[in-house]
Image (tube, helix red, strand yellow):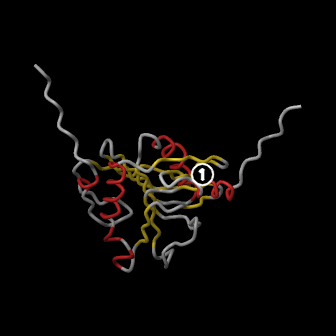
Amino acid sequence: MGDPARKIPTFEELLAEIDRLPEYLSGEIIEPGVIRTMSRPDAPHRRAARECQWALRGASADVTGSGWWIEQEPAVRFGERLFNPDLAGWRVERCPDPPHGYPITLTPDWVCEVLSPSTARDDRKIKLPHYARSGVEWVWLIDPEIHLVEVFRAERQQLWLVTSAGEEETPRLPPFDLEINLVSFWIPRKPAEPPSP
């Protein structure tokens, strides 16, 4: 006789496991029964997330009293999955008070993922389509390595690339009606070393 099928841990069991992780790690449930642990992000990642949140302050309900509730690294439950987007936003019209609870169960209207070499593949292959299927209308992917922001919009549970911007551009990126200076998102590149004689 073979071994009985391995029991898949419940969402609650996995959440308790994530809560026991050391302070220097964070965890997500990227597939039912599967935890992905990550070390805290490096400087380019932290800078892009921080500057993005700062650039969106003009849309923040905390500042303007209307617009968006924008949260940094909220734990958001999507069915049997738990994602910690770098930033997430809820429209005040749909969510009159800041989202609460742990994990948050109200689907965001917008999420932003800052890509890291260790997580970019899962962010694109697993999280991006799951956001669309879960009702997230807008998704930004920020790549601090190549200085690029991609803006996706969900239609019929599919995400479509609407626009992209990078380097020193100052675009208006949907869904926010703000000019966003992208220069501050990036750690300046070091000039290339001249070839030695």
- Based on the displayed image, in which of its 4 quarters is residue 184 positioned? bottom left
Determine the residue positioned at 69% across, 56% down. 13
On the image, the x and y values in percent for residue 150 come to 37, 49
Q: Nearer the viewer, residue 157 or 181?
A: 181
Q: Is residue 105 left or right of residue 65?
A: right
- Mark 1 Cα shell of 10 Å, populated few (<14), some (14-19), many (≥20): many
Residue at the extreme left:
197
Determine the residue positioned at 53% across, 53% down. 22
Residue at the extreme right:
1
Determine the residue positioned at 26% across, 48% down. 187
- Based on the displayed image, in which of its 4 quarters is residue 76 positioned? bottom right
Q: Is residue 138 left or right of residue 168?
A: right
The number of numbered badges drawn on the structure is 1
Amino acid type of the residue tagged 1 in the rendering: Ile
Against 13, residue 61 (above or below) is: below
Q: Nearer the viewer, residue 76 or 19?
A: 19
Quadrant including the N terminus: top right
On the image, the x and y values in percent for residue 34 come to 63, 46
Q: Is residue 152 left or right of residue 99?
A: left
* Dot 1: element: strand
Residue at the extreme top:
197
Quadrant including the C terminus: top left
Residue at the extreme front:
22
On the image, the x and y values in percent for residue 112 come to 42, 56
Q: Nearer the viewer, residue 162 or 197?
A: 197
Against 90, residue 139 (above or below) is: above
Q: Which residue is mark 1?
A: 29
